[in-house]
């Protein structure tokens, strides 16, 4: 979608985004020639359609996020995760409060733990490096994979999930 | 006044460039994959998933590097078939590592992530209208998965498609001309009618299927070692489509599938022998048509 300032015959530029509101985006465009501003207001159907493409709407200065091409879905599907730091994805805030998969949302409970394990009720925490590595997993899948890895850690009594635990899980799951 | 095509860019969001970036990421991830093989039908319940997984097992046993992607996000079965229901994908250095089947190849299936008692759900901003966006969302997810996995060097990446004649064409358009399509049918006129529609849809899209596999072609009786008729029309074929082989319904195979075991552990089963023949013809076809 493009916007044209008819009096100036100039393409309008995306200027800013207003905070999302009940599934609607407010995207402000301005004419570089005359400064006239207009707002594109989407209805939830339109917002959802764009979000479904896995793209972000916003000024293009965050080229890295644009190149990754998935920030629009990071929080969208994750439910439990906020948008990545610096993300300008307007969908993230709207979708971040949606329901998260339950603690059993991974595969069938029953990933057999070795006999020597020490199951713990303590919810394992994630180290920064392990959290960073999880970004290699698509956003929609990530919370489910996190749940499975946390279960793996709990069954073994690990209180922190770090890269060593990720490697152990990787070996255990046969990768 | 300027028209749409007189203006470059979209004023800031670069939506088209982002979509192109997603495709480039998929292309890069699949650069080491020699053949993309989509197994579809149009008809449900004909054994697409079973044949996909067991063909992969046979190909792996022959020394091919293979992997399986369960593209049926809503009715995933590959996790159970491959015995990876309790194995979630984990992150590598920059890509996603897949659980390995008991036959040793990587498998992605939503069945590893979502219990069979749960539906696969996507968050939505427009509740009650999933018919307007769901397919788009699913293909976006497919692209994210294809672009995130460390596929490495593969001879064949097999995709297990969901049922639906129209879905096959959507997959053909999404996956591009590299992908070859094999259809699965059974010897029932009812099923063949649907599979023929799928074949016609693929041809109409300029992406004709390379052939079809006739599944449940008779009943392999473990008691008398004979294959007996299961449907009254088993001699008919699908006009204009090469038959890559006929696989009998085999209760032993059904048991192996429930247990997540590869058929290559039981090479003397009638279904194993048939699948071995199909795999051989399939490899020849892929080499010829690539």
Image (cartoon, coloured by chain):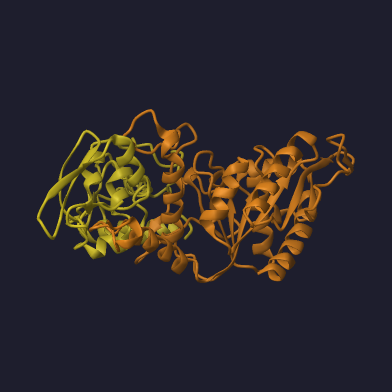
Chain identifier matching the orange colour in the rendered picture: B
Closer to us: A97 or B251: A97
**Quarter occupied by residue B127:** top left
Closer to us: B12 or B43: B12
Residue at x-position 52% and y-position 49%: B84
Residue A102 screen position, x and y as percent: 33, 35
**Quarter occupied by residue B219:** top right
- Label total for image: 0
- For chain A, give the colour: yellow
Residue A130 sits above or below residue B31 on the image: above
Residue B217 seen anywhere in this rendered image of the structure: yes
Q: Is residue B17 left or right of residue B265?
A: left
Residue at x-position 46% and y-position 42%: B135
Residue A74 screen position, x and y as percent: 29, 50
Q: Is residue A1 left or right of residue B243?
A: left
Residue A118 seen anywhere in this rendered image of the structure: no
Residue at x-position 36% and y-position 61%: A167
Closer to us: A5 or B280: A5
Residue B282 screen position, x and y as percent: 72, 62
Residue A174 screen position, x and y as percent: 48, 58
């Amino acid at each position: 979608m493009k916007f044209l300032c008819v009096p100036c015959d100039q393409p309008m530029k995306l200027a800013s985004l207003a905070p999302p509101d009940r599934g609607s985006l407010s995207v402000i465009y301005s004419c570089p020639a005359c400064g006239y501003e207009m707002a594109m207001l989407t209805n939830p159907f339109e917002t959802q359609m764009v979000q479904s493409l896995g793209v972000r709407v916003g000024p293009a200065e965050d080229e890295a996020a644009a190149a990754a091409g998935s920030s629009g879905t990071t929080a969208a599907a994750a439910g439990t995760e906020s948008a990545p730091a610096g993300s300008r994805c307007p969908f993230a805030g709207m979708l971040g409060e949606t329901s998260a998969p339950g603690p059993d949302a991974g595969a069938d409970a029953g990933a057999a733990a070795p006999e020597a394990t020490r199951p713990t009720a303590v919810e394992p925490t994630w180290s920064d490096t392990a959290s960073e590595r999880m970004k290699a997993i698509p956003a929609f899948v990530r919370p489910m994979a996190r749940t499975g890895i946390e279960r793996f850690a709990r069954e073994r009594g690990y209180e922190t999930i770090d890269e060593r635990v990720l490697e152990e899980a990787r070996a255990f799951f046969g990768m | 006044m300027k028209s749409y095509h007189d203006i470059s860019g979209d004023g800031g969001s670069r939506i088209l460039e982002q979509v192109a970036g997603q495709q480039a990421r998929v292309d890069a991830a699949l650069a080491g994959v020699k053949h993309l093989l989509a197994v579809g039908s149009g008809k449900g319940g004909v054994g697409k998933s079973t044949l996909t997984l067991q063909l992969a097992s046979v190909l792996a046993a022959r020394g091919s590097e293979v992997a399986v992607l369960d593209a049926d996000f809503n009715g995933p079965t590959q996790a159970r078939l491959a015995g990876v229901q309790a194995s979630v994908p984990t992150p590598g250095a920059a890509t996603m590592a897949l659980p390995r089947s008991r036959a040793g190849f990587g498998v992605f299936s939503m069945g590893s992530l979502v219990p069979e008692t749960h539906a696969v759900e996507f968050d939505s901003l427009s509740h009650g209208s999933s018919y307007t966006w769901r397919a788009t969302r699913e293909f976006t997810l497919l692209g994210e998965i294809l672009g995130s996995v460390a596929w490495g060097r593969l001879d064949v990446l097999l995709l297990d498609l969901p049922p639906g004649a129209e879905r096959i064409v959507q997959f053909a358009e999404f996956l591009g001309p590299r992908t070859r399509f094999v259809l699965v049918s059974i010897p029932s006129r009812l099923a063949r009618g649907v599979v023929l529609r799928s074949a016609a849809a693929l041809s109409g899209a300029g992406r004709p299927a390379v052939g079809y596999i006739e599944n449940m072609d008779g009943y392999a009786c473990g008691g008398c070692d004979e294959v007996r008729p299961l449907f009254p029309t088993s001699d008919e074929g699908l006009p204009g489509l090469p038959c890559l082989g006929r696989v009998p319904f085999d209760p032993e195979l059904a048991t192996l599938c429930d247990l997540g075991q590869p058929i290559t552990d039981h090479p003397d089963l009638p279904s194993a022998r048939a699948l071995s023949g199909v795999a051989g013809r399939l490899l020849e076809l892929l080499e010829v048509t690539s």
